[in-house]
Amino acid sequence: MSVGVGITCGGDLWEPDQIRAVEELGFDSFWTGEHIIYHRPILEAVTTLTYAATLTSRIKIGPATLILPLRHPTITAKQFSTMDVLSGGRMILTVGVGGDYPREFAGCEIPINERGRRATETIEIMRKYWKGERFSYEGKIFHLEDVDMLPKPVQPNGIPIWVAGRQEGPMKRAARLGDGWHPYMYTPERCRDSFFKVKEFAEEAGRDLPSNYTFACFIYTALYDDITDARKRAVAELKYRYGQEFDHLVDKYCGYGPPTRIAEYLQKYIEAGANYLILAPIMPPEDRRSHLERYAEQVLPVLEGMEPGKVL
């Protein structure tokens, strides 16, 4: 299996030409972040993805990551099936439970202690909707009677769902219900451990993961020729994004420096078993296209043809 490489805007406003550049330069997908109420400005994911879908024609489009418990499953199923139809079958849905910013759960009037159960039931319900048949559903949270939804997604088996997270709960959800597992803020070593845990949890649940199961990873990168400058920019950007100090974490969770150093950093994730990388490039807003051009010209060719470390 070849390795897919996507680019996320992180919920920031990108100009149309910058979004088109992701497709024109040979990346596989365009992603956006997700928070409803947060400590910094961030665009809503579904609206942003619809915008990106209209500007592109080939690449996949998806959230990295949609906070699933904040939405009702019927609405989420409808939004993404509609986007899949309008985009010609290009949607991927990466989902997580959130919880790192409790104020947005309060703002959406969703009990934060229900987020895991809500996510599990929502995945189950969406998959039923996407079959296009009538069904009823009796869960601990959601109770649906004689419902159905048309049109179905364009993709024959429905929209692929990748489960994101950092703990064992999401890993088990990915093993039982997901088409992929998508950790973030993981080292290559922790990625590999989690990939094998997902495989183990699937076996315990009586499921054989398909050969096209996705083992993805969300990775921050700062491509600048001067390593000291690259590190400084990465620390400042991640502090802004997460509202906390990052000087003690940046070496662990961000690849920075010139193209050769970035490529070597990403190769470690592929060797660990990742078959899809979602890159979050740290770059000046006014200079995004030229930055992406450097990735396409000097990083992607190094990754092409690499075989992911064996997991399945």
Image (tube, helix red, strand yellow):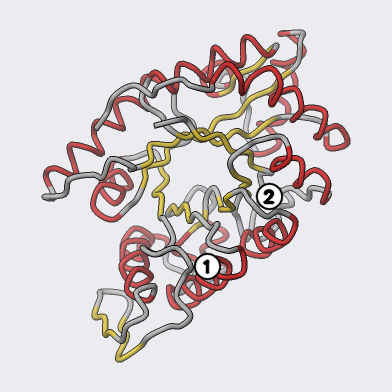
Furthest residue to the right? Answer: 286
170 or 307: nearer the viewer: 307
Above or below residue 230? Residue 78 is below
Q: Secondary structure at mark 2?
A: loop
Q: Which residue is mark 1?
A: 80
The image shows a total of numbered marks equal to 2
Quadrant into which the N terminus falls: top left
Residue 20 is left or right of residue 118, and the answer is right
Furthest residue to the bottom? Answer: 146
Could you say which disc has been placed on residue 11 in the image?
Answer: 2
Above or below residue 205? Residue 261 is above
Image quadrant in which you'd find residue 282: top right
Q: Secondary structure at mark 1?
A: helix
Above or below residue 154? Residue 74 is below
Q: How far apart are the two marked residues, 1 and 2, measured between alpha carbons?
A: 18 Å
85 or 244: nearer the viewer: 85
Quadrant into which the C terminus falls: top left
Q: Could you tell me the amino acid type at mark 2?
A: Gly
Q: Could you tell me the amino acid type at mark 1?
A: Phe
Could you say which disc has been placed on residue 112 in the image?
Answer: none
Residue 233 is left or right of residue 194, and the answer is right
Tell me which residue sits at (31%, 32%) in the image. Answer: 194
Tell me which residue sits at (33%, 47%) in the image. Answer: 170
x then y, percent, for residue 94 = 47, 52
x then y, percent, for residue 114 = 35, 64
Tell me which residue sits at (38%, 36%) in the image. Answer: 215
Disc 1 vs disc 2: Cβ atoms closer than 8 Å? no
Residue 226 is left or right of residue 245, and the answer is right
Tell me which residue sits at (70%, 11%) in the image. Answer: 258
